[in-house]
Image (tube, rainbow, N blue to C red):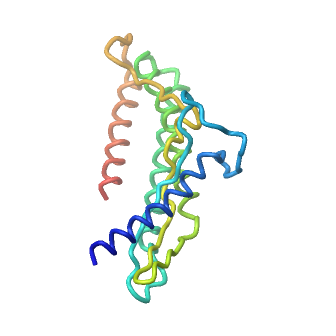
């Protein structure tokens, strides 16, 4: 029985790997590009992560609860990232913001959170893809796309560094402190959401 199960898992792994490997020749929109060839120094192409579930006999609606939970999380986290962008843009527009370090942090938050929003949008798109059922005779596997790996490289995104100890501190206003405290509370809420 153990060898049979290992064989089933090997087949399932091969079937799951095939779409991911094939996707290496697709652009982000899913268009096949037969002219793309391997380049040793090129960034890794995007590949899809999958979630696999063994289906109990008679089970027809796999992942429903997981997909609903994932959608809630992605929607909430996307709104959370949008909130960080809004807070940072408001801070940068405020003439009372004076700290070069805090202003650099706000610009980094805007750039980095926009990338995170794009990632959330990709995950949301993946969640809408249909679940595939692989019938192996003795059992069935439900397979769903979850996320795309290497999007940062594919989109050529470079994270914007946050301020470090060598950045000029400059004068600190009450608005600077308000922004910093607001960001601490904002990101503490994100940790609560992630743990939730």
For the N terminus, give its image quadrant. bottom left
Residue 73, quarter of picture: bottom left
Q: Residue at x 44, y 17 (%)?
A: 98
Front one among 84 and 164: 164
* Rendering quarter of residue 168: top left
The number of numbered discs placed on residues in the rendered structure image is 0
Q: Quarter holding the C terminus?
A: bottom left
Location of residue 30 with respect to 93 vertically, above or below = below
Q: Is residue 176 left or right of residue 81?
A: left
103 left or right, relative to 40: left
* Residue 132 place in picture, x, y as percent: 54, 71
- What residue appears at the point 45 percent right and 76 percent down from the top-left corner? 62
Q: Examine the rendered structure and indicate whether residue 81 appears above or below residue 90.
A: below
Q: Position of residue 94 (x, y in %)?
A: 52, 25
Residue depicted at 41% across the width and 81% down the height: 139
Where on the picture, by quarter, is residue 53?
A: bottom left
Is residue 160 visible in this depiction of the protein?
yes
Q: In this rendering, does residue 86 appear at all?
A: no
* Residue at the far front in the pictured view: 3
| Picture layout, residue 79 above or below residue 50 | above
């Amino acid at each position: 029985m153990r060898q049979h199960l290992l064989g089933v898992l090997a087949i399932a792994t091969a079937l799951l790997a095939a779409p991911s490997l094939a996707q290496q020749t697709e652009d982000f929109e899913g268009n096949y590009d037969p002219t793309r060839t391997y380049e040793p120094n090129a960034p890794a192409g995007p590949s899809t992560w999958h979630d696999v579930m063994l289906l109990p006999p008679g089970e027809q609606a796999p992942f429903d609860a997981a997909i609903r939970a994932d959608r809630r999380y992605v929607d909430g986290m996307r709104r959370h990232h949008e909130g960080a962008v809004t807070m940072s843009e408001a801070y940068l527009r405020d003439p009372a913001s004076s700290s070069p370090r805090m202003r650099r942090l706000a610009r980094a938050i805007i750039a980095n959170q926009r990338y995170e929003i794009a990632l959330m949008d990709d995950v949301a798109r993946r969640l809408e893809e249909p679940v595939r059922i692989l019938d192996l005779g003795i059992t069935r596997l439900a397979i769903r796309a979850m996320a795309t790996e290497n999007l940062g490289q594919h989109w050529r995104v470079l994270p914007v560094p946050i301020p470090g100890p060598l950045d000029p501190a400059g004068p600190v206003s009450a608005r600077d402190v308000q922004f910093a405290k607001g960001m601490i509370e904002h990101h503490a809420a994100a940790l609560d959401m992630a743990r939730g």
